[in-house]
Amino acid sequence: MAFEGLTERLQNAMKKIRGKGKVTDADLRETMREIRLALLEADVNFDVVKNFVKTVRDRASGTKVLEGLNPAQQIVKIVDEELTKTMGEEAVPLNKSDKIPTIIMMSGLQGAGKTTTVGKLANKLKTDEKARPLMIAADIYRPAAIDQLVQVGEQIDVPVFEMGTDVNPVEIVRKGLEKAAEDHNDYVFIDTAGRLQIDEQLMQELSDIKELAHPDEILLVIDAMTGQNAVATAEGFDKKLDITGVVLTKLDGDTRGGAALSIRAATGKPIKFVGQGEKMADLDVFHPDRMASRILGM
Amino acid sequence: ANFRHVDEAFFDDLEEALIESDVGFETAMKISDSLREEVKIQNAKRPQDVQNVVIEKLVDIYEEAGKNENNQIEFAPEGPTIILFVGVNGVGKTTTIGKMAAMYKKQGKKVLLAAADTFRAGAIQQLNEWAVRDGVDIVKHKEGGDPAAVVFDGVKKAKADNYDVLFVDTAGRLQNKVNLMNELSKMKKIITREIPEAPHEVLLVLDATTGQNALNQAKLFKESTDVTGIILTKLDGTARGGIVLPIRNELHLPVKFVGLGEQVDDLRPFKPQDFVYGLFKGLIEA
Ligand SMILES: Nc1nc2c(ncn2[C@@H]2O[C@H](COP(=O)(O)OP(=O)(O)OP(=O)(O)O)[C@@H](O)[C@H]2O)c(=O)[nH]1
Ligand SMILES: Nc1nc2c(ncn2[C@@H]2O[C@H](COP(=O)(O)OP(=O)(O)OP(=O)(O)O)[C@@H](O)[C@H]2O)c(=O)[nH]1
Ligand SMILES: [K+]
Ligand SMILES: [Mg+2]
Ligand SMILES: [Mg+2]
């Protein structure tokens, strides 16, 4: 994409400044403007950008960076550090229950990648821990959602619990959990239908499932290409469900992925995994520092 | 702020609303500059007048980028009309086909679907379920089969059995995956080999929640498949799809339909006025 990285942007801005030998307030403002633009072009939410830039400005003006040898690089470093800090610094693993099963419930907008991510996570646990997961098909709305999960199950050799599309999702989950108890599954995944965070009826359905299942992990799945709306989405799901973590999908594309910063700033909840492709192995642990560099175009 | 005080703060808010609609920074600034001018020229002061000026001007800006463009679906003068659907993963291609197929069926057309997404789990069943719901025919192969072969069979059947419209569903793919984009070009070539004027439409499906990356999507899909129009889905959510403005300015692609939900009737012809209004709805209601 034609977007310039932050480093280039700041270096260009600083070239103008450096000729004069002294950094003025106006120069600092110009620098902050470049940071603001770079973040907006990366799809970071407008309000999040505002607050973030303020943090960076306070830190930059409090130190002597602008008088140093390479102010552009120093400011990039501050931005990079602050971004990483905002996004959580360290990778956060999946929650695990003391006694089996650990219950993981999915949530998110339509088409975000929930069903695919269920398969990827189950597959990962199978490989890493020799886990014996069960996947519950609780999306009764989207055409062939159950077929999709069943096929995913076949691909990774993990059983799927389904009751067709005529049973209430809450009831499906109840029966699914009974089945998991019988079979001593150590992980249970609940695949849910995509929904808008403003759809009260369907959001209530998720609350009901939560109430019944007491999930150890409620994952919000968000498409990395999401724009300004990422905050509204994340807040909507978090308010209703008190999510425990986020999965950012489709990072194998060429998006900057500013949504990551927006979500984190809006909810404070950790991004735990990133989707890097359509195949079952295409799942990685989230690394805040890498994500920061990506957003900044470095 | 609202239209009661048309001052600098108002234009700041307007810029903010546009950016929050995913219009992008540059486009937001350009628009707000020309709106400032227009409000001055028309000497609009009352809130209602300003509101009208802003909407009118925005529609103008929208339409300027699309002189001579066709926002209708192009039908073949005779023989089957072939419509190819392309786009990144999960945007709503298959669902939109389900909706459009029902619409044309209702109009009395003979409709055929081709399930050329042989890759994603459950994709064939999903399209098949739409075919059953809509009461239209479908050409499908086995999961994991060659999508080009499905396309070939679809076009052949559409010709042989006198279908009016063939919808070709393809697997979602990210625009930076060169191999997958080449596969798509190949499918398109197969269609053209069978019917020289076809595909009559190549519709790029964009998810309204997408940010600035949608511009890249439009560019690269246009390069590989010569996209003729856009379908903007998921406008029933809180996202506004503002990225359509820079896409039009740069690529001149018309939006033909918008998706407003998951049900068969949740498809509407694109109306610039409604769209533009949606871009800064919050500002007016405040
Ligand atoms: N390239 C890429 N595609 C992905 C990734 N994760 C999911 N997908 C694709 O995105 C599309 C949607 O994925 P699903 O898993 O069906 O999404 P969902 O959230 O379950 O969708 P609904 O159930 O309809 O709400 C499919 O084409 C997936 O193959 C990813 O990390 N990278
Ligand atoms: N709210 C809303 N949901 C939609 C709309 N259009 C499609 N969806 C939903 O979005 C999800 C993905 O739709 P699909 O039609 O499977 O998307 P696709 O582009 O075919 O996906 P892949 O084939 O996996 O790339 C499904 O849950 C649809 O029901 C819309 O206009 N509004
Ligand atoms: K999406
Ligand atoms: Mg799903
Ligand atoms: Mg599809």
Image (spheres, rainbow, N blue to C red):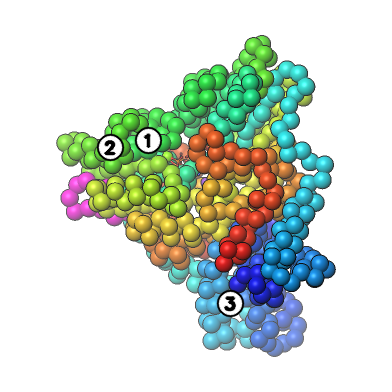
Left or right: where B213 falls relative to B73: left
Measure how far apart labels 1 and 3 are at the Cα level.
53 Å
Q: Which mark is residue A74?
A: 3
- Amino acid type assigned to the residue bearing label 2 in the image: Ile
Q: Is residue B8 above or below residue A280?
A: below
Return the x and y of residue B15 as percentages of the image width and height: 66, 67
Return the x and y of residue A114 as percentages of the image width and height: 42, 44
* Quarter of the image where one finds residue A237: bottom left
Work out whether residue A14 or residue B15 is closer to the camera in this orientation and state it.
Answer: B15
Q: Earlier in the sequence, mark 2 or mark 1?
A: 1
Return the x and y of residue B127 as percentages of the image width and height: 51, 27
Determine whether label 2 and label 1 are within 8 Å by CB.
Answer: yes
Work out whether residue A129 or residue A148 is closer to the camera in this orientation and state it.
Answer: A148
Most common SS among magenta residues: loop
* Quarter of the image where one finds residue A119: top left
The reply to whether residue A251 is in sight is: no
Chain of residue at mark 1: A
List the residue tagged with mark 2: A172
* Quarter of the image where one finds residue B16: bottom right
Left or right: where A51 falls relative to A205: right
The reply to whether residue A171 is in sight is: yes
List the residue tagged with mark 1: A140
Chain of residue at mark 3: A
- Amino acid type assigned to the residue bearing label 1 in the image: Ile
Q: Residue furthest top?
A: B160
